[in-house]
Amino acid sequence: MGSGPSNPEPSVLRALAAPPLAADDPVFETFVDDLGARLRRVFGAGNARALVVPGASRAGVEAVLASVVEPGDRVTVGAYGHFGELLCSLVERHGGALRRIDAAWGEAIDPDRVAAELRRAPPKVFAVVHADTSTGILQPLEEIGRVCREVGTLLVVDAVLSLGGCELRVAEWSIDAAMGGAQKCLGGPPGLGPVVYSDRFRRTLTARREPPHSAYLDLRRLERQPRSTPLLFGLREALRIVEEEGFEARWDRHRRAGGALVAGIEAMGLETFGDRARSAPMITLVRVPEGVIEAGVREQLLAEHGVEIMAAFGQLRGRVWRIGTMGTNACLPSVLQVLAALEAVLSARGLRIQRGVAVDAARAAFQS
Ligand SMILES: Cc1ncc(COP(=O)(O)O)c(C=O)c1O
């Protein structure tokens, strides 16, 4: 119940044990085509290019930025958490002239502010995180997409957390490049960076004055030479399961699981962190009550209940816990288990909690 990786389905784990295929094996070519089609569908990416960068989700994030940003290019980043900071640092590392639009941690960025900034001086790229795992906030993108299209800016979105767990419509929202994660709401293995990008985005890559500084993270090279790893078999199986469930049913399951968790947390008398109206369904931040040792609770949850929750990053470290409801864990039994365990651990540590109400509230909320 952490911030990912989530627990993959057993068939995903079995798929990982298949023998590797050589990259020049004709079977691999067919496999890559099928994987690409599945990725386009789960991203809602129309006829975009799809490929998978082996090497953690941030390899996909960096491949997109390394490939599109040329030294001196104007790039604006919307930052409202740790992964927005990652975007900023990657833009600078690849020589972009960075401009930031910041929101306080716990809030989303106001799309009207973005629109005004972009219209005033359109950058080449606007990059933003869809759901930032460090703050639990979901950034609305539709209006930003419309403005980017209007002013001729490429919209690049980190959808590592959100992919498969809530509505994401890359083509419809005019997103030019999106980077996902296999190991969160998709329930696949960690170690892969699936990405999709539009023709418009691709034309910018072709028009580069110089090749990207990174040889490995060059999307055009990765297009020509897809890398083969058995992790891809796990991803394909995860995507098969996602399609079998149906995208909207899966988004709804994540919404209900997140809602049930929040209902239980509040019934227990604890507080969540961040703007609830902008909260992502697949991760919930819970304020650590006064006098409670943050790390001690996590250790006891794991040791006594077999439940893992996560610490926070940066300015929130020690102040909140992060509880994930993603992939296989976005279900009532997991939510009830973490609530019952948290209640027991906090009670044992002297916090006055009315026992049983959290589980009841979560059960009721899950039905709605
Ligand atoms: C929103 C977001 N972006 C990027 C990443 C980086 O993923 P990885 O750790 O797989 O490189 C994460 C990981 O938690 C994330 O949550």
Image: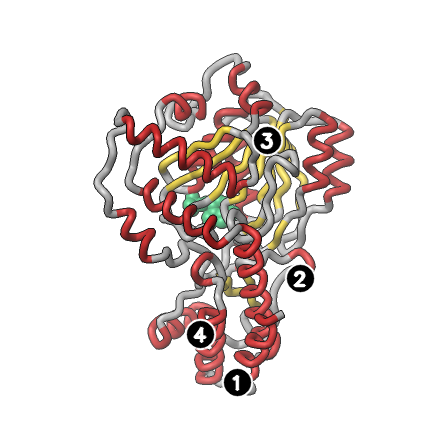
Q: Which mark is residue 276?
A: 2
Q: Position of residue 352 (x, y in %)?
A: 55, 86
Q: Is residue 291 left or right of residue 275?
A: left
Distance of mark 1 from mark 3, alpha carbons?
47 Å
Q: Kindly identify the residue that appears in the image at 46 percent across and 39 percent down.
A: 38
Q: Is 112 drawn above or below residue 360 in the view shown?
A: above
Indicate the secondary structure of the residue bearing disc 3. Answer: loop
Give the label, 4 or 2, closer to the camera: 4
Distance of mark 4 from mark 3, alpha carbons?
40 Å
Which badge, 4 or 2, comes first in the chain's sequence? 2
Query: Looking at the image, what colour scheme do you see?
Result: secondary structure
Q: Work out which quarter of the rendered image holds the C terminus and state it.
A: bottom right
Callout 4, which amino acid?
Gln
Q: Which mark is residue 337?
A: 4
Q: Is residue 24 left or right of residue 98?
A: left
Which badge, 1 or 3, comes first in the chain's sequence? 3
Indicate the secondary structure of the residue bearing disc 2. Answer: helix
Q: Is residue 65 visible?
A: no
Q: Which mark is residue 356?
A: 1
Q: Nearer the viewer, residue 151 or 200?
A: 200
Q: Is 159 drawn above or below residue 185 in the view shown?
A: above
Q: Position of residue 148 (x, y in %)?
A: 69, 31
Q: Which mark is residue 176?
A: 3
Dot 4 beta carbon under 8 Å from ligand 1: no
Callout 2, which amino acid?
Arg
Indicate the secondary structure of the residue bearing disc 4. Answer: helix
Q: Is residue 28 left or right of residue 73?
A: left
Q: Residues within 10 Å of mark 1 (few under 14, many from 20)?
A: some
Callout 1, which amino acid?
Gly
Indicate the secondary structure of the residue bearing disc 1. Answer: loop
Dot 2 beta carbon under 8 Å from ligand 1: no
Give the label, 2 or 3, closer to the camera: 3
